């Protein structure tokens, strides 16, 4: 059985939606060898900077400690560290560790959300007005019209941002016209859609048709429990990503292609 860490229990309180609550609860009791070592968040067995202040900054994100991330960032700024190196060498390094552990199923949704909050708390204290997480391009993110679940969307946002993209979150239950307007306004390199309900995923087909009808060729990548390759194959301009790691690989591929053009 997976452990109820402090982060896990706190995370269960993040949402009141019963569907998501019980999804998290089921995940905690999913099959797992009791003898399997649980990754200690305070002692990451991964590559983070050894030098200070970046080591401690990374740990603050791994531990999901917003207060510590803020204080360490403020101290680093006072000591002359630049906003970009604080973000990349420290805060993002910690987020990348948590992202990898999440992909390995060694930490879970609540820890990821807490880490994302610590990351943003630190970024906000750098005193830099430019977006430090938008070096690779802009992506739009939303859930299908009628789908109010946002935990999966928020996880995707945290991981994609940690990998250098600026995520414009359109929210939940987003209508096709709003997606279309956002594409025209922000010129993203990709549109990301999430759906946990088979009854709402059909909205993606409508959105795909609308994009095609308007001669918009921006990649439309979908994911979530209600989606799969078979569903996405119904439209030539739809693509499926089975997890955040695969999504980032797809985005990086799109980004490389755009640079080469």
Image (spheres, rainbow, N blue to C red):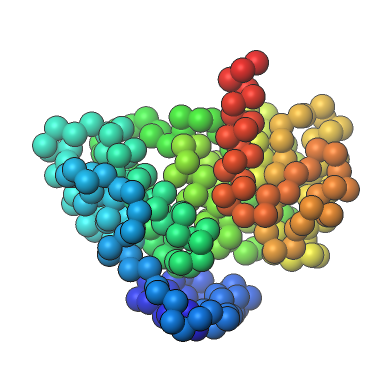
64 to the left or right of 136? left
Residue 43: percent from the left, percent from the top?
A: 28, 63
Q: Residue at x 41, y 49 (%)?
A: 96
Q: Is residue 239 above or below residue 226?
A: above
Residue 144: percent from the left, percent from the top?
A: 72, 55
* In the foreground, 105 or 176: 105
Q: Residue at x 59, y 41 (%)?
A: 249
Q: Residue at x 60, y 75 (%)?
A: 23
Residue 215's image quarter?
top right
80 to the left or right of 97? left
Residue 92's image quarter?
top left
Residue 203 can be seen, yes or no: no
Q: Residue at x 14, y 32 (%)?
A: 80
User: Which residue extends farthest front?
Assistant: 35
* In the foreground, 30 or 152: 30
* In the foreground, 40 or 121: 40
Residue 36 can be seen, yes or no: yes
Q: Is residue 194 above or below residue 50?
A: below
Q: Is residue 145 above or below residue 30?
A: above
* Quadrant of the rendering where the C terminus is positioned: top right
């Amino acid at each position: 059985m997976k452990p109820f860490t402090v982060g896990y229990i706190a995370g269960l309180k993040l949402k009141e939606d019963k569907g998501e609550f019980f999804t998290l609860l089921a995940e905690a009791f999913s099959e797992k060898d009791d003898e399997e070592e649980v990754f200690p968040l305070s002692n990451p067995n991964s590559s983070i900077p050894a030098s200070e202040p970046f080591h401690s900054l990374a740990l603050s994100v791994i531990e999901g400690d917003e207060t510590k991330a803020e204080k360490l960032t403020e101290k680093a700024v006072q000591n002359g560290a630049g906003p970009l190196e604080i973000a990349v060498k420290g805060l993002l390094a910690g987020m990348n560790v948590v992202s990898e552990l999440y992909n390995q199923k060694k930490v879970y949704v609540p820890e990821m959300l807490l880490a994302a909050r610590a990351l943003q708390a630190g970024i906000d204290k750098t005193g830099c007005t430019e977006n430090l997480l938008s070096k690779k391009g802009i992506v739009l993110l939303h859930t299908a019209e009628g789908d109010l679940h946002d935990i999966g969307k928020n996880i995707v946002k945290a991981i994609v941002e940690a990998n250098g993209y600026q995520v414009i979150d359109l929210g939940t239950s987003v209508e096709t016209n709003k997606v279309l307007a956002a594409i025209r306004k922000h010129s993203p390199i990709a549109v990301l859609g999430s759906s946990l309900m088979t009854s709402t995923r059909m909205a993606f087909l409508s959105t795909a048709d609308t994009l095609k009808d308007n001669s918009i060729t921006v990649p439309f990548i979908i994911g979530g429990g209600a989606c799969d390759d078979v569903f996405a194959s119904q439209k030539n301009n739809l693509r499926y990503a089975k997890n955040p790691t695969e999504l980032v690989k797809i985005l990086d591929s799109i980004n490389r292609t755009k640079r080469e053009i």
